[in-house]
Image (tube, rainbow, N blue to C red):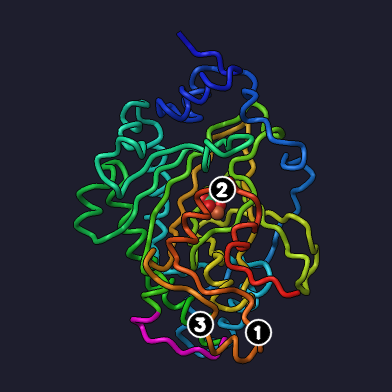
Amino acid sequence: MAPSFDNGSSLFNFVVRDGNGVKGIVDAGISKVPQAYIQPLAEQIGKKNASKHELPPIDLSRLYGPDHDEVVKEIVRAAETLGFFQVVNHGVPVELLESLKEAAHNFFGLPPERKAVYRKEVSPTPLVKYGTSFVPEKEKALEWKDYISMAYTNDAEALQHWPVECRNVALQYLNSSLEMVRKLVEALMENLGVELHDSQIDILIGKKMVNMNFYPTCPNPELTVGVGRHSDMGTLTILLQDGIGGLYVKVPEDVDMEKKGEWVEIPPIPGALVINIGDMLQILSNGRYKSAEHRVRTTSTKSRVSIPIFTSPKPTDKIAPLPQVVEKDGVARYREFLFSDYMNSFFGNAHDGKKSLDFAQINSA
Ligand SMILES: O=C(O)CCC(=O)C(=O)O
Ligand SMILES: [Fe+2]
C-alpha cells in the first residue's frame, strides 16, 4: 500500500529510511508535493528570478599560449566577484559528458532496492553513499533531490566499489578533470603572490568526490527547491549540468558588478563545465575569492541531472588564510582549524546560505 505522503513520519520512512528517495514518491504518482517539501516563502524560487548570467565561457586552451595572462585575469575576476564561471576546452572529452548524464539517468532509473543498498547505514563501502535531500534530519523542508556520492581514494578502489552503472565514466571524468583543476588552483594562487609546487597544490585538492544529483520532475516547482541556498565546502567544484537549467547564483552585495544581491541563472552551455569557488578557497585567500551562494530550482517538465566533482583538503589538514595574503592584508579574517571540524560543522547543519563560513570567521569588533 502506498504510504500517506502527508504524514511526516511515514513520508520520512519511505523516502529517507527505506531509500525510495524523491523519485519514489514521484513514481507513486503524486499530483501535488507533500507538505514536507514545501519551502518557507522566503526560500521559494519564483519564475521572475530568471535573469541569466551571460558571460561567455572561458576557453582554457588559451592558458597554454600567448593569451595566458589574459585568461588568468578572466579566471581571477570571476573568482573575486561571482565565484562561478564556465569553461570550454577543459580537457574532459565532450562525448564523456554525454555518457555521464546517461549513466546518471541509468543509476537513478534502477529499482529502489538496488540504490538503497548504498544508504549510508548499510552501504557495503564507506566510499559510496546514496541519499536524498542534504541533511533530512535537520531540515525544516526537504530538498527535491536524490544523489549518489563516490569518494575517491585510488583508481583500483573506485573501479571495485563505485556502482557498476557509473564507475567507469565517473572515474574518467575525475581523472580527465584533474589537470584543469590543478591549473585553475595554480593560477588563482599565483595571482595572490603565492607560488605552490605541484605537491602543495595536491594538498588543497587532496580529497575528491564525484556526485551524481537527480532532480525528479516536480508537480509544484514554485513551492520547492532542488537544492537550498548554500556554498560548497571545499576548494573548487567542477560541475556538469544537463540542458534543463535551474542553477542560480547570488551576486554578492559587496562586489563591483551589476545586479548586486540578485540571483542570476548559470545557463547550460553544451560542452561546457561550470566551476565554482568553495569555502576553502575563500578562507585561504583571506576573503579575496568568493565561495558562491547558489541554489537549484525544480521543474515540472523533465527530470534534471547534474554531476559535480568536489575537491577539498583532506580531513586531517589544518587550514588557515595563507600567511603571504594575511601579511599583505594586515589582518587574518579567518582562524586556523582542522578541516574535519569544518566538515562536521558543514554536514551537521541544514543548508543556510553562506553561514557555513561562520565556523572560521574572525569577527572584527
Ligand atoms: O545541480 C546543480 O546544478 C548544483 C548542485 C550543487 O550545488 C551541489 O551539489 O552542491
Ligand atoms: Fe553546490
Res 241 visible = no
**Where does residue 331 sit, x and y in percent of width and height?**
65, 84
Q: Which of marks 2 and 3 is nearer the N terminus?
A: 3
Element on which disc 1 rests:
loop
Q: Would you say the residues marked 2 and 3 are in contact, meaning their CB atoms lie under 8 Å apart?
A: no
Element on which disc 3 rests:
helix
From the viewer's perspective, tell me whether residue 272 is left or right of residue 49: left
**Where does residue 360 sit, x and y in percent of width and height?**
58, 67
Q: Earlier in the sequence, mark 1 or mark 3?
A: 3
Magenta stretch? 192-200
Q: Residue furthest top?
A: 1
Along the line of sight, the residue nearer the viewer: 304 or 338:
338
Callout 2 environment at 10 Å: few (<14), some (14 to 19), or many (20+)?
A: some
Residue 54 lies in quadrant: bottom right
Along the line of sight, the residue nearer the viewer: 281 or 319:
319
In the picture of the structure, the residue carrying the numbered disc 3 is: 187
In the picture of the structure, the residue carrying the numbered disc 2 is: 349
Callout 1 environment at 10 Å: few (<14), some (14 to 19), or many (20+)?
A: some
Magenta-span inclusion, residue 34 = no
Q: Which of marks 2 and 1 is nearer the N terminus?
A: 1
Q: What residue type is labelled 1?
A: Val
Q: What residue type is labelled 3?
A: Ala
Q: Nearer the viewer, mark 2 or mark 3?
A: 2
**Label annotation for residue 331:** 1
